[in-house]
Amino acid sequence: MELGAFFHSLKHKWRENTSQLGESLYIARSSNKAGDALRRRYGYRQPLKQLSWGVKGFIGRFSVSLIILLICSVFFLSFGPNSSNSRVEVNVDDLWGTAASGDWRPSSAPRSDWPPPPLEGNGYLRVRCNGGLNQQRSAICNAVLAARIMNATLVLPELDANAFWHDHSGFEGIYDVEHFIKSLRYDVRIVEKLPEITKNGKTKKIKGYQLRPPRDAPISWYLTEALEKMKEHGAIYLTPFSHRLEEEIDNPEYQRLRCRVNYHALRFKPHIMKLSNSVVSKLRAQGHFLAIHLRFELDMLAFAGCYNIFTPEEQGILKKYRVENFKDKPLDYEQIRANGKCPLTPEEVGLIFRAMGFDNSTRIYLAAGKIFGGERYMKPFRALFPQLENHNTVAGTEDIAENTLLGSAVDYMVCLLSDIFMPTYDGPSNFANNLMGHRLYYGFRTTITPDRKALAPIFIARENGRTSGFEAAVRRVMFNSKLGGPHKRVHPESFYTNSWPECFCQTSPKNRGHKCPPENVMEILNSRMQSDETDTAESEVTSNFTSSIS
């Protein structure tokens, strides 16, 4: 009876999923490469070294392989993670709210013994943060942690803005310095510049000994080589300082310090916050809005090697940029595309939103630089979603247009505060990766992360004229994600993209390490800091008195 019931159920599943199977097969037939991508996805492997058969043998084996593929596909669609049975149906209206939190809430306050920084440390730490605004942001977090590790006084980080943004604002022109120093007073001592010393009647600045840290340097490097030079010279200057401290550190308190810097201490200057809030208010005046980081720009397209959709002239521009800025290597566009390594085009983004159920009244904020190819590539997107905005169209000020760095800062805040955020290329994009982490910490705000590798064969099939089942196939990919909820961090996902569970806590946890700190944790830290300062002052008075009578 049980066996009979099983086969009856299997027969029912076969009929139920015939249409879904057809949708999958139209993808597999689109091209050899798209088919290869699909077979890899469904766990099917064809050993290439065994293709030395005769024609008859090949046909026979191919038939068997096709049957196996059909059975595996039916099984996968019926019982796999993308099946209608295991996948939760998502109502697009629900996406405007936050993702399910699972009783987790953001918390980066210390939960164990965390002594305040001593009045006298081992020396001064200077760093030069290179790269763009968001790469610099993570470097600042690492600089604070490095200062804590070495028991050093941090000099306000230098931002190498001139090289990337052609801007001279520096830290003081972007971030609220007073807030930064005050927010971290229980963690590290911070000064705005190196102090001057008087020696032999002459006053001069301390010179920091220059070091080039290894990429993703371990804590041991800071406690040995760097600390040794700091004690010897009084100050060290680490340059460049991008990705110079390992991300995965087996110390939750150190990771929470990174979160305190990133999500609490680093606050843009008041005029940037005011402008950002104004943009958000204008967008919200007409209801919900979603924001996308449309990374269809010269540098990213050249980096990815995605040329073939462009004119010969445009391809020449991309290739020239790649030679001048990136390591040259052979490129196979078809393979790159099939593997989902290309940024989504504006039209593909529009088709994804349409398939998910967003209508043409949806208001969309574009965080993007200059779209490569111009209006020719934006026109199909605009036809699907005419209410497209950016900081220039909403803010109505020339200040942003003339200041690239200001525009990037405003884009960051608007994307952070949007109801929904979607990056179109989250690979090497620090902007998108940092935002996903910030939105997770900011209350599990809905973040849609397209699986470009899974979407690639679907779009390739559509380009080849096979459109049946297109939207259903897109939906299955897009709704098979956490959508901004708490989830385990798996390599290569960055800590700055997902700081769960270190920077989150539960009020009623099963694991004691996930318990939220006491509500008066800041009062405890402040009390301990004042106590240490009083003890130090009393010790100095006693020492001076002893010296005077001896």
Image (cartoon, helix red, strand yellow):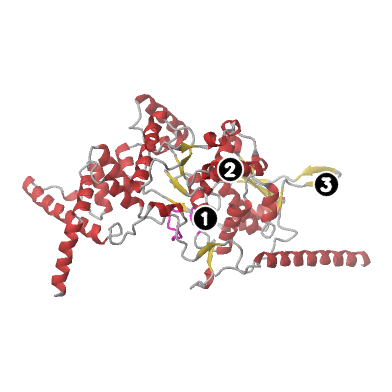
Residue beneath label 1, please? Answer: 247
- Earlier in the chain: of badge 1 and badge 2, it is 1
Instruction: Characterize the local packing of mark 1: few (<14), some (14-19) or many (20 or more) Cα atoms within 10 angstroms.
Output: some
Residue beneath label 2, please? Answer: 276
Q: Which secondary structure, mark 1?
A: loop
Q: Which secondary structure, mark 3?
A: strand
Which stretch is magenta? 485-499
User: Where is residue 419 shown, x and y percent of the image?
Assistant: 48, 49
> Is 327 positioned to the left or the right of 5 in the image?
right
- Earlier in the chain: of badge 3 and badge 1, it is 3
- Quarter that holds the N terminus: bottom left
| Any part of residue 180 in sight | yes
Q: Is residue 251 magenta?
A: no
Q: Nearer the viewer, residue 255 or 396?
A: 396
Q: Which secondary structure, mark 2?
A: helix
The residue at 45%/42% (across/down) is 363
- Residue furthest to the front: 286
Residue beneath label 3, please? Answer: 199
Q: The residue under label 1 is which amino acid type?
A: Glu
User: Where is residue 40 shown, x and y percent of the image?
Assistant: 26, 51
Q: Is residue 101 above or below residue 369?
A: below
